[in-house]
Image (cartoon, grey):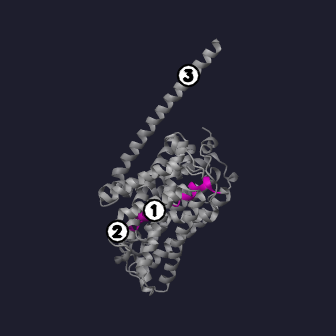
Amino acid sequence: MEASAIAGREAGLHKDLSRSQLVMIGLGGAIGTGLFMGSGVAIGYAGPAVIVSYAIAAIAAVAMVFSLSEMAVVHPTAGSFGTYAEIYLNPWAGWIARYSYWMAQVIAVGGEAVAAGVYMTFYFPGTPVWLWSLGFAIVLLYFNSRSVNNFGSIEYWFALIKVVAIVVFIILGAASIFGIGGFMPRGFGGVWMAVILGILSFNGIEVIAVTSGEARDPVRAIPAALRTMALRLFLFYILALAIVVTFVPWTETGATVVTQSPFVRIFAHSGIRHAAGIMNFVVLSAALSSMNTNVYLCSRMLFSLSRGGYAPRFLGRLSKNGTPITAILLSGACILVAAGLSKLTPLAYNYLFGVALFDAIIVWIIILLSHLSFRRRHNAADLPVRMPGFPGVQLAGLALLCAILITMGLDQSIWRISWVVGVPWLVLLSAAYFIVKARRARSASAAAAARRIDAAQGGAH
């Protein structure tokens, strides 16, 4: 099928997102509890050298996001990298990218919903976590069902809270710094393991490309937003983590709850009253922002699959506001199931998270492979946006991601779960694709045969 026809299937979405909203949506998707709370795990692996770990992870993230920028400007669609994989690799790759990403985001939102409920118990001890989780999920599903501009405005303010918190944190931390210990206490092995956390933290940066189908001026807005966002993310993560490992002894940063967060330590040392409460609000905003963005991503992936004939047709319907309302509602139902599983038994959620983690890296690999094929079909001089360093940067990103996947598979403590559940998931997903493909082929053959019979009967008369 022609590339224009594949991209054209997803027409009808309203183009109401501004450049400033795109930047904040991207920041909101990539700056989350992974920085505010999860960074403690990475520091536990690498110590102060966690800065090197995140810089290595940033190489893969920058390669992926700039490759995505080139393709998004040429094909601004809601299916984004799933559509590009279908165009430049094959329909199977498009199927895998979209369904894998949808599953990863459903699990992520389910986890964030539970986390948001836990954070609210800081202010209202004794209240049921599930009640807050359900309430937040319903409110954010409502916002996503409204116009895309409404979604963009909400996410703009959510993301702004996080950005302001990081800037204030950096300023306060810089004013309080005193000496640091050994830079690489666990050697390069620890630095490399922390790269896994770095990749997870940057996951979500690709959201801007998904918004390209609803951007007012994608040719200008998308590349500009991606460039500024990549720079800001790098500065925020590297500077914030530099402050953490300089101010707080690295052996004390394994935070699991908000009152132990290294960010709270900086705020408290500065003399700010109610530092824990302020930081809890920031982390709550981070969780809600991530939920809001990921609900958007889930619905657009299902919408794209439906318009491509790979999911039920009703999921491709748009409301009067131009939003895929049925795709939003179905994604919301699956999110609540994921949240329920995480609350009922942590073991079940660990397996789901294994799928999400594996899928996220597979999707990044598919994006880079799609871009290599994209460049073979397009003259670089004709592209509105060109990434410097092609193809070296892309190949380096692919090598990094493959090495991380192998490292996770060999790890016996935590990360091996991603292979244990991720590989069977890919096998099941592939089997489902070929079943759907066979059914579509039979339906097409039957329809062609019926047309031939009608034509023959018409000729006889």
| Labelled pair 1, 3 in contact (Cβ < 8 Å) | no
In the picture as drawn, the residue positioned furthest to the right comes out as 382
Identify the secondary structure beneath mark 1: helix
In the picture as drawn, the residue positioned furthest to the top comes out as 460
* Residue underneath mark 3: 450
Let me know if residue 416 appears in the view: no
* Residue beneath the point at 57% across and 68% down: 231
Foreground disc of the pair 2, 3: 2
Amino acid type, callout 3: Ala
Q: Is residue 190 left or right of residue 93?
A: left
Instruction: Say if the magenta span includes residue 207.
Output: yes
Q: Nearer the viewer, residue 400 or 137?
A: 137
Identify the secondary structure beneath mark 2: loop
Q: Which comes before the other along the chain, label 2 or label 3?
A: 2
Q: CA distance from mark 2 to mark 3?
A: 62 Å
Residue 271 x %, y %: 44, 87
Amino acid type, callout 1: Ile
* Residue beneath the point at 49% across and 28% down: 442
Q: CA distance from mark 1 to mark 3?
A: 52 Å
Amino acid type, callout 2: Thr
Instruction: Say if the magenta span includes residue 214.
Output: yes
- Within-10-Å neighbours for mark 1: few <14, some 14–19, many 20+: many
* Residue underneath mark 1: 199
Residue 355 x %, y %: 39, 52
**Above or below 253: residue 89:** above
* Residue underneath mark 2: 127
Q: Quadrant of the C terminus?
A: top right
Q: Which comes before the other along the chain, label 1 or label 3?
A: 1
The stretch in magenta equals 188-215
Q: CA distance from mark 2 to mark 1?
A: 34 Å
Let me know if residue 370 appears in the view: yes
